[in-house]
Amino acid sequence: MRLLLIEKKVATQWQVPSSSSSSSVDRDNDCQHQGEETVEPSEDAREDEPLLGKKEDVRSFEIPESRYRWAESVPILYCFLNPRLLIAQLLAVIQAALLAAFDATVPTEAQELYGFNSLNAGLLFIALVLPYLLVGPVAGWAVDRYGTKPVSVVGFGYLVPVLVLLRWVRPGGTTQIAIYCVFLTLCGVGLGGIGSLSIVESSHVVRLYERANPGLFGANGPYAQLYGIHSMGFSFGLTVGPLISGGLKDRIGYGNMNIVVAACCAMTAFLSYAYIGGKPKVWKRT
């Protein structure tokens, strides 16, 4: 289906502008020069933006003239001076590390507690992955409807008590195995809730820079570079996740390892509240 779609910015290259469209473009340019441009939902809104995105003044994203020459050479790197973009990439690292932590520790813990072989341990991941698949689209709708800040705070905050529950996994028979599956299912719900946050917030911040500094990123924009950096961060999380979680499990045990992971999620929830989607309104008043 994607092959049958045409981006609006591509279609406009082959469209003869009418007088009405030209006047609307002129009005938009006038607003931009006056510094009154805001990010509002429009007919060309992309899927990586909240559908009910709040109005946001882009003047704070304008690059000063003293830094413009340096920013022009590597514009995508300049955007990372904004803490919102840095924290958005941190969300990708934490998300990937969480996924990798489950991959590294669930099979070994199941073998130690229940004597599971590879097949039985693999079946445990159904309890983890199935909620992830079901909750992911719902969480994406919530991001479009309410924005990235509330979803990120709720998502990572929800994972804190759920991960703590894994400390009470015990050896036993069918009952204990069922309890472990329930705990993994709850974790899968949380993982599904945080799946789309990083790339949505990153794309939104970079688009604000693009609107505030026309022509800085070229005709096609910086999104391919952004997605590449996002993939680097996600891959980094997949790399360090098993190393850290596996090392902690061997040193302090499976339950205490999940306490540490829960603390990381709590810290990420706080950083999301502080930076994702902009500063909280309470902080702006002070």
Image (spheres, rainbow, N blue to C red):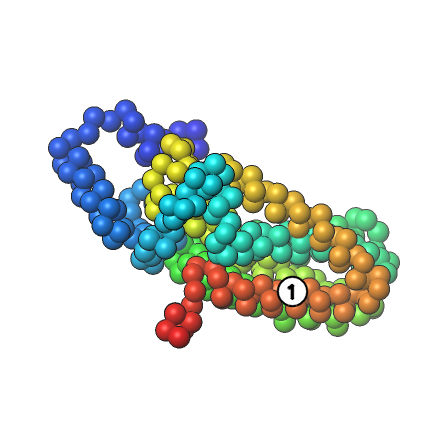
Q: Which residue is drawn at 82% across and 56% down?
A: 108
Q: Residue at x 82, y 67 (%)?
A: 252
- The one nearer the camera, 286 or 134, is 286
Q: Residue at x 54, y 56 (%)?
A: 87
| Residue 13 vertical placement versus 142 (above, below) | above
Q: Is mark 1 on a helix, strand or loop?
A: helix
Tell me: 96 left or right of 63. right
Residue 97 lies, in percent from the top left, at: 67, 54
Residue 218 occupies which quadrant of the picture? top left
- The one nearer the camera, 202 or 58, is 58
- The one nearer the camera, 55 or 174, is 55
* Residue 178 showing in the rendered view: no
Residue farthest to the bottom, as pictured: 286
| Residue 114 vertical placement versus 23 (above, below) | below
Residue 219 lies, in percent from the top left, at: 38, 32
Q: Residue at x 33, y 57 (%)?
A: 56
Residue 259 lies, in percent from the top left, at: 71, 69
Within-10-Å neighbours for mark 1: few <14, some 14–19, many 20+? some
Tell me: 238 left or right of 255. left
* Residue 59 showing in the rendered view: yes
- The one nearer the camera, 3 or 202, is 202
Residue type for callout 1: Cys
Quarter of the C terminus within the rendering:
bottom left
Tell me: 159 left or right of 141. right
Residue farthest to the left, as pictured: 19
Q: How many marks?
A: 1
Q: Mark 1 points at which residue?
A: 264
Residue 199 lies, in percent from the top left, at: 50, 48
